[in-house]
Image (tube, rainbow, N blue to C red):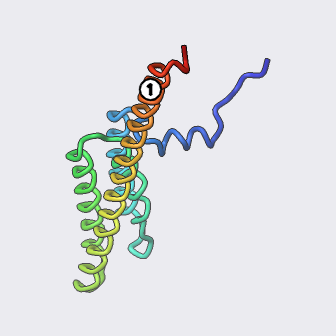
Amino acid sequence: MFKKYPTIRSRIGRLVTPGSLSERAVSIASIVLICGICWLDSKTHSDIRLRILYMFPLAMLALHVRRGRTCFLGFALVASCEATSLVSTHLPFATRFIETLVAITGFLLVVVLARAVRDNYLNLRLRSTTLEVSWLSLKWRSGVLR
């Protein structure tokens, strides 16, 4: 009778569930977003920092991409964009160095935490299906399910 439309909650659920999106699509979208944020960051005034926006494509890469090499490529691209953006500012060298170090540490933290969440989620999902099959086979052998 009523057509069921996907809710915002279900769409966000797909975004944050490891393995629910295509690795290739996430990789391409993340690289494009990182390059777009880098371009925007270069066009804005040096007082406006868009550093926090890099976290979203990095987290998506770390959650959905199986290969660590691709995550590292995204991390390296973000780090180089951030370093390029800070080099073009008129801040003293020590301030630029510390800002770059803090930003890269934050990006690394996002990648490590998202990878840990991915690994734990996939491990739990594997265990839950394995335990369920084991439980059913034990019930079947004991005669409860016959």
Quarter of the image with the C terminus is top right
Q: Nearer the viewer, residue 139 or 14?
A: 139
Q: Which residue is drawn at 33% across and 39% down?
A: 28
Residue 145: percent from left, percent from top: 55, 18
Q: Which of 117 and 138 is in front in this view?
A: 138
Q: Quadrant of residue 38?
A: bottom left
Q: Which residue in the structure is indicated by mark 1?
A: 138
Q: Residue at x 38, y 41 (%)?
A: 122
Q: Quadrant of residue 19?
A: top left
Q: Badge 1: few (under 14), some or many (20 or more) residues near its Cα, within 10 Å?
A: few
Q: Which residue is drawn at 41% across and 43% down?
A: 124
* 114 to the left or right of 74: right
The relative height of residue 131 versus residue 35 in the rendered view (above or below) is above
In the displayed orientation, state which residue is furthest to the top.
146
Q: Which of 63 and 24 is in front in this view?
A: 63
In the displayed orientation, state which residue is furthest to the left.
69
- Count numbered badges in the picture: 1
Q: Residue at x 26, y 74 (%)?
A: 101
* 74 to the left or right of 123: left
The three-letter code of the residue at mark 1 reads: Leu
The relative height of residue 60 versus residue 142 in the rendered view (above or below) is below
* 54 to the left or right of 91: right
Residue 22: percent from left, percent from top: 38, 32
Residue 114: percent from left, percent from top: 37, 54
The relative height of residue 49 versus residue 16 in the rendered view (above or below) is below
Q: In which quarter of the image is residue 87?
A: bottom left
In the displayed orientation, state which residue is furthest to the right.
1
Residue 1: percent from left, percent from top: 79, 17
Determine the secondary structure under disc 1.
helix
